[in-house]
Image: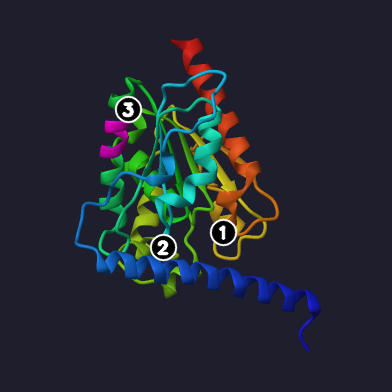
Amino acid sequence: MTEPSAAVDRLARARELGAVAGSVVRGSVRLLAAPLREPSRAAACCATSGTRARSVSLTPVVLLHGYGGDPRDWAPLARVLAAGGYVHRDAMAYDWVRHDVPSIAAALVERCERAREGAGSPRVHVVGHSLGGVAVRYAVQRLGLAETVGVAATVAAPHRGTRVARLGLGAAVAAIRPGSPELALLASTQAPDGVRWLAYWSDLDRVVEPASARLEVPGLRVTRVRVPGVGHTAILRSRALAVSLLGELLVADAEDAAAA
């Protein structure tokens, strides 16, 4: 007979996987119905907020959603960043059905450069959820984004892979299966200097296990932050995540300004 706690855990896992699957199905229909495009476009989530910030940061923040996601997933975080003074916020979309992680990461590098130049800033902060977090690592560790990135934050990202990815479709999801060539390459790549890494993870994430999300990689300067009581997608709506990330970005900007 199944213990009650085990049954509850299985039910919670099934509900979260069902929510993720629903998002993937809706996203797949949207992507397959659309014409083939480059893996980036403007995001509706990041329009200028009406909230007046006490101070303004010129450092742009580029946001990369996860597998099956959409730039609108970042709306709660974008509002907090706007209130905190980050006037340059850019959520990038990509076609996770047709594009693989290296091509998504390459598009991210270009997007970050455009955001940095448009803001007139020497630095850019970048945040990736789930698959997007792995693409952030690829861009920073393999494609030169480390030269201009201030903070690289990953949210519920499967740095050691996730077994759930075996059920996924499309080119990008293969990279987040345990033992994938992309994950092996990142693990063997020398850590770039000067990058502030943040790894957000949740104890209730049934899609990406905490051990995979904590970014426990030798050589990386990582601050690991637990976001309690939320699941894999609900973490993006967490006030605790938004407030913590805003604080970390403000500290990083202050340190860079003091060192200039």
Q: Which residue is mark 1?
A: 232
Along the line of sight, which residue is nearer the eye, 213 or 130?
130
Query: Residue 46: percent from the left, percent from the top?
Result: 42, 40
Q: What distance separates the C-alpha of mark 1 from that of mark 2? A: 12 Å
Q: Residues within 10 Å of mark 2 (few under 14, many from 20)?
A: many
Query: From the viewer's perspective, is residue 10 above or below residue 91?
Result: below
Q: Residue 116: name its quadrant.
A: top left
Q: Residue furthest left?
A: 36
* Residue depicted at 59% across the width and 40% down the height: 242
Q: Which residue is mark 3?
A: 116
Q: Secondary structure at mark 2?
A: loop
Q: What distance separates the C-alpha of mark 2 from that of mark 3? A: 27 Å
Q: Which residues are magenta?
A: 110-115
Q: Which residue is mark 2?
A: 68
Q: Amino acid at mark 3?
A: Arg
> Who comes first in sequence, dot 2 or dot 3?
2
Q: Amino acid at mark 2?
A: Gly
